[in-house]
Image: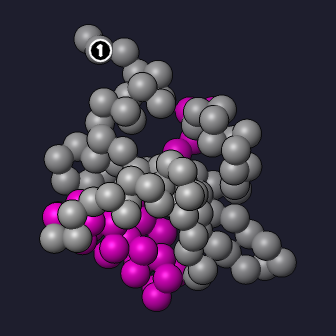
Amino acid sequence: MEVGGDPDDFMKVFNSLDKNSVIYRDVKQVIRSLKDRDELIGVHLQRNKVPKHYIKKHGVDAYYKVELPDNWRLIYGIISIQGMKKALLMELFDHVKYNKRFRFKKK
């Protein structure tokens, strides 16, 4: 499947990572799995739990969350265009920013 990344919320962060870091290598592995094996990685997110930011900005068909080392998260979506599935890597962030985006509160 074809894979692309949001220029602001994904690419800027991904390109700033140390190329030798575990997070960088794990994200590259997710990309390879999506591209080479059409394999969906991570947990499917129920649409009613997806922040409106993603729905307004991307409007994809299905949303997924991948948990990464050091409490980082990757959010991506699947789009179907003329029967072809495409993956859009929407956001890569640490747990604090993830909690803020999904409006989770500290206990």
Q: In the rendered view of the protein, which quadrant contains the N terminus?
A: bottom right
Q: Secondary structure at mark 1?
A: loop
Q: Residue 42 appears in which quarter of the rendering?
A: bottom left
Q: Is residue 37 magenta?
A: yes
Along the viewing direction, whichever of 91 and 12 lies nearer the viewer: 12
Q: Give the residue at x 33% y 66%.
A: 27
Q: What span is colored magenta in the figure?
A: 21-49
Residue, disc 1: 106
Q: In the rendered view of the protein, which quadrant contains the C terminus?
A: top left
Residue 55 in sight in this render = yes
Image coords of residue 14 (percent x, y): 37, 60
Q: Is residue 105 magenta?
A: no
Image coords of residue 106 (percent x, y): 29, 14
Residue 47 in sight in this render = no
Q: Give the side of residue 77 with respect to residue 71, left or right.
A: right
Residue furthest right as drawn: 82
Residue furthest top as drawn: 107
Q: Give the residue at x 32% y 75%.
A: 29
Along the viewing direction, whichever of 15 and 69 lies nearer the viewer: 15
- Which amino acid type is shown beneath numbered disc 1? Lys
Q: Give the residue at x 17% y 47%.
A: 70
- Decide: is 16 above or below 57: below
Image coords of residue 2 (percent x, y): 60, 80
Along the viewing direction, whichever of 16 and 56 lies nearer the viewer: 16
- Label 1 packing within 10 angstroms: few (<14), some (14-19), many (20+): few
